[in-house]
Amino acid sequence: MSKSLSLRWLEVFQLIAKSGSIQQTASETGLSISTVSNHLRSLETALGIDLVDHGRRPMGLTPAGEVFARYVREGLTVLKRGEAEIRSGNWLHATSLRLALVDDFDNQVAPELFRYLAQTLPRCNFRHFTRPSHEIIVKLQEHKLDAGVATRPPGRTEGLIEYPLLRDPFLVILPKTYSGTVEDVLKPDADLPFLRYSRDYTIGKQIEIQLTRSKINLPNRFELECNQSIAGLVAEGSGWAVTTAASFRRARRFHDNINVQPFPGRNFARTVSLFTTEVYPSSTSMLIHRVLSKLIKQNYCDPICTRYRWIEQDFRVLPLESA
């Protein structure tokens, strides 16, 4: 090797290898297009070989580039993991935590979680975010978060470590004033309309998949993002919905006006997990998982299972070894 390799060159090459675009890499790094091109050329000159086929759009890696990209990714991951261990590997020495929660746990779990972590991690600076599950996963993969509590998506979560937290079964919620059965509202011409979760959200997609599997076809008249709005509309008699036990628990001010029933046929559930980047220290991750498990059981599982005994086998926190 004729000269030392710059860490910046390697970082830029990794982004180009992933996106196939110098322009996108410039946008992600905040560098100019010419600077990104110069970094790539400098790396190729130092190695004495072309890593990228410059004649293709989007850019493709040469065979040598494919091999080198694998080693660069592994090497940068090790460096980032080392940096993370230095910054927050020891609980007492943790200095930063960017943590996002889905809104189901924002009111009751988040304040207690951060009070505990503030005492346990006395030097740590916390940044708390509330986001939908799909946004949390994306921000983790972009390394804009360190950890996030989200619904497990149907696809792969490449580059992330998952610590399962909760099995959260889906339920049917009906107005207390409604005298019909669950089977009645499943008919396409039912008088009581179906209130959908937004199909942009992970929970909405899971419900639609289950309805399709069950051969249930319902008109799409109402599609909402807000769990509280859905529960409020059900409570006032404006419709019915499929939701989860945890989401229903969060809407507890509407409970007296809602009737809860099991989902007809084969039951189904979402898995809520703590996700972290692959470089975030496992010791801190397990600390967060342990505290979250305790708070979710105390504030969600126990109250719901006490009131609805038929759900206690399905609505439960998960040990770390659960898949």
Image (spheres, rainbow, N blue to C red):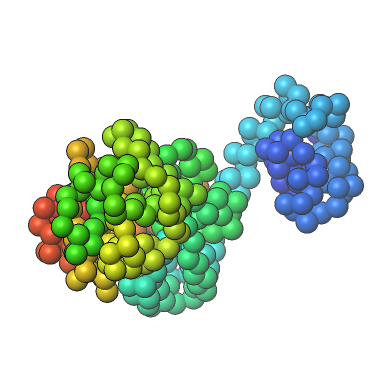
Residue 301 vs 190, above or below: the answer is: below
Horizontally, residue 31 falls left or right of residue 67, namely right
At which x and y percent is residue 282? 42, 53
**What x and y, as percent, mark residue 129?**
50, 67
**Residue at left 31%, top 44%?**
189
User: What residue do we see at 26% from left, 44% from top?
Assistant: 186
For the view shown, which residue lies furthest in the top direction?
A: 63
**Quarter-of-image position of residue 59:** top right
**8 or 216: nearer the viewer:** 216
Q: Residue at x 27, y 42 (%)?
A: 187
Location of residue 259 in the rendering, given as x and y in whole percent from the top left corner: 19, 61
Q: Nearer the viewer, residue 320 or 199?
A: 199
> How many labels, in total?
0
Judging depth in this view, the residue of 182 and 260 nearest the camera is 182
Q: Is residue 80 visible?
A: no
Q: Which residue is depicted at the point 28% across and 64% down?
A: 237
Which quarter shows the N terminus? Answer: top right
Lateral position of residue 116 relative to residue 181, left or right: right
Image-quadrant location for residue 153: top left
Q: Is residue 127 visible?
A: yes
Query: Please, is residue 81 above or below residue 298 in the view?
Result: above
Q: Position of residue 98 (x, y in %)?
A: 52, 65
Image quadrant in which the C terminus is located: top left
